[in-house]
Structures are given as structure tokens and as C-alpha cells.
Image (cartoon, rainbow, N blue to C red):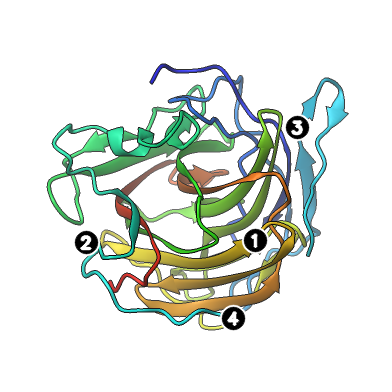
């Protein structure tokens, strides 16, 4: 699939977490290997403390891109299914809808490009950042994984992502992550999100799973609700390990125009459940987006490996 210069400006809300802010890509490339744009991602935001973490006081910020002089505006409105037991160690299960384990023999990211059309999936990066690549340095299963590097040492927000269009109203979205280094996010650091895309000039982030520091100086997960412009409390503040594979899994039940239900898991343990939450906008394709995106990190250069990404109708046990 040939590279394209198409991009998606949009209004994005970013609310800073404790030394780590909710991430929101200002662009999505559909059917392209690389986003064509100048400069960084243009994300800004105020701060809001994560409960149980060191706080940096401030107010929530709003940021946005413009198209033809007009600001893009947000859209959308503000029971858990029973999780079956299937799969092991990130391996496929009977409910498999999509799999990218990087073990198809091509030593590439070809699995992300599979689908009925060019908009089914792909990957992209900011113009001054490397694209996600196939790597044998780390792997959760098989021989390789996706290596994603962003360098925020220039103090610009940077993004490199993988994405898949969502084709079913109820499914689990699963990926294994490996953090090669420890980082302190000055603003935000995001690895997993859901997004609605109306057309090539308009998209809306719905929920982002971010990495933030706790008062105990460990990494944890934090969730940002874009429609309501707020960081959601994750009571247990589960620890995210370094230099060790961990699984993030999301059960999303959605129907356009109706309240959604979202349940999130870290290594198989539920850490947040949202019922009657934001509705997916009508007449907008929904995408699952994972990768590496951040404002200024210390150290500035971040490496994240991703493997065994799946979409399944059944729970995938770690």
C-alpha cells in the first residue's frame, strides 16, 4: 500500500495527569504508512492530579487544529458482558477477529495493513519521527514485535501509532507492551486509545489509556475521558512494570448514538469499568489506536515494543 499525504486535523482535549497527561493525537492517517504534516502534534493541556499521585495543580486545557480557518468541534454524547476464558499468553482464540503477532513470515508490519480496504488499518508517525518497525530485539511470542520510538527531547509532542478500524459492536481489544526505559512524563504519555473518524478532515478521541507516575514514583495507568474533558479515577493505581511484557485489554460495547460500556484490564485484572459512558458518534468509523505518543519525557527518547495485538469476541487470558 502506497504512502499517502492525507491527514486528519481535529479538536483534541488534553488534560495533564501527574507528570503525565492524557494523550490525544491531532491527526489520524487512514490507509497511509506515514502522516504528512509539519512540526509536532500540537497537543497542549492543563493539569489535573491523579488521585494518590504527586500533584501539579492547574486547570484543564483545550487544544485544537483548524481546517480552512474553521475550528474542528467535538461530537458525541456523554453491562459488562461476561468475559469468557480463551487464549493463553496472547495466542489466538476461537473468537479471533484480528491478529498482529508479527509472525506471518514477512518480518514486517503487513498484518496491520490487511483488510477489505486501505482504511482497515495501518501505521504512521510524526514527520520527524521513525515509523513503527518490525524488530527482533524483544518479542512476547514468536520471533519479533513492533518497535516504536518517539524522541521528545526537542520538547515537542511526538506520536507514532498503529491502528485498526472496529467492525463489531462488542469485542475485546488486546495488546502486549514492553517499556524499554523508565520515563517521567512532563505532560502526557499515551499507549492505547479509541477514536471516531467522520472523514479525512474530522476525528474525535473518546478514551485514552495513559502512563503516569504515582506518589511512590512508579508507573501506573490513567484514563482520560475526552468527551467530558476529565481524568477518570483508577482507584487501585496498578503498577506498570518496566522491561517486562504486560497486557492491556479493553472490552468495548458500543452502538452509534447509544451510551457505550468500557471495561479495562491490566494483566487480566480489571482496573476500571465505565457503564453508560460516551456514545460513539453516528456515521463515524471507530478506530482502535495503539503505540507510543508523548509530550516531553525524561529521558526524552522512548522505546515501546508491542506484540500479539488482537481483537476478539472473547476475553484473552494473560
Q: CA distance from mark 3 to mark 1?
A: 28 Å
Q: Which residue is mark 3?
A: 65
Say which of marks 4 and 3 sits in front. 4
Name the N-terminal-most of marks 4 and 3: 3
Say which of marks 1 and 2 sits in front. 1
Q: Are discs 4 and 3 less than 8 Å apart at CB?
A: no
Q: Give residue 187's position: percent from left, percent from top.
A: 61, 51
Q: CA distance from mark 1 to mark 4?
A: 13 Å
Q: Which residue is mark 1?
A: 255
- The residue depicted at 55 percent of the width and 20 percent of the height is 36
- The residue depicted at 37 percent of the width and 70 percent of the height is 314
Q: Is residue 245 left or right of residue 151?
A: left
Q: Which residue is mark 4?
A: 79
Q: Are discs 4 and 2 less than 8 Å apart at CB?
A: no
Q: CA distance from mark 2 to mark 3?
A: 39 Å
- The residue depicted at 69 percent of the width and 31 percent of the height is 9
Q: Are discs 1 and 4 less than 8 Å apart at CB?
A: no
Q: Give residue 41's position: percent from left, percent from top.
A: 62, 33
Residue 122's tag is none
Looking at the picture, does residue 63 appear above or below residue 279?
above
Amino acid at each position: 500500500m502506497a504512502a499517502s499525504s492525507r491527514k486528519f486535523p481535529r479538536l483534541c482535549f488534553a488534560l495533564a495527569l501527574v507528570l503525565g497527561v492524557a494523550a490525544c493525537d491531532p491527526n489520524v492517517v487512514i490507509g497511509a504508512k506515514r502522516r504528512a504534516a509539519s512540526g509536532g502534534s500540537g497537543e497542549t493541556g492543563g493539569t489535573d492530579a491523579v488521585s494518590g499521585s504527586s500533584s501539579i495543580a492547574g486547570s484543564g486545557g483545550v487544544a485544537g487544529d483548524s481546517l480552512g480557518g474553521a475550528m474542528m468541534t467535538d461530537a458525541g454524547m456523554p453491562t459488562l458482558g461476561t468475559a469468557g476464558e480463551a487464549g493463553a499468553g496472547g495466542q489466538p482464540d476461537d473468537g479471533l477477529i484480528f491478529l498482529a503477532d508479527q509472525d506471518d513470515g514477512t518480518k514486517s508490519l503487513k498484518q496491520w495493513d490487511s483488510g477489505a480496504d486501505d482504511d482497515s488499518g495501518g501505521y504512521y508517525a510524526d514527520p520527524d519521527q521513525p515509523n513503527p518497525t518490525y524488530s527482533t530485539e524483544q518479542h512476547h511470542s514468536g520471533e519479533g514485535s513492533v518497535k516504536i520510538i518517539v524522541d521528545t527531547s526537542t520538547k515537542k509532542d511526538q506520536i507514532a501509532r498503529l491502528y485498526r478500524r472496529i467492525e463489531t459492536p462488542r469485542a475485546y481489544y488486546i495488546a502486549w507492551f514492553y517499556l524499554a526505559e523508565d520515563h517521567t512524563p512532563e505532560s502526557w504519555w499515551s499507549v492505547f486509545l479509541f477514536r471516531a473518524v467522520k472523514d479525512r478532515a474530522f476525528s474525535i478521541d473518546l478514551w485514552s489509556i495513559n502512563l503516569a507516575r504515582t506518589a511512590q514514583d512508579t508507573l501506573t495507568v490513567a484514563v482520560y475521558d475526552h468527551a467530558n474533558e476529565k481524568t477518570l479515577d483508577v482507584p487501585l493505581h496498578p503498577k506498570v512494570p518496566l522491561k517486562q511484557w504486560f497486557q492491556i485489554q479493553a472490552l468495548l460495547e458500543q452502538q452509534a448514538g447509544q451510551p457505550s460500556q468500557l471495561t479495562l484490564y491490566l494483566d487480566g485484572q480489571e482496573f476500571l469499568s465505565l457503564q453508560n459512558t460516551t456514545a460513539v458518534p453516528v456515521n463515524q468509523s471507530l478506530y482502535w489506536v495503539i503505540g507510543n505518543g508523548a509530550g516531553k519525557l525524561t529521558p526524552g527518547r522512548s522505546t515501546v515494543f508491542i506484540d500479539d495485538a488482537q481483537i476478539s469476541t472473547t476475553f484473552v487470558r494473560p
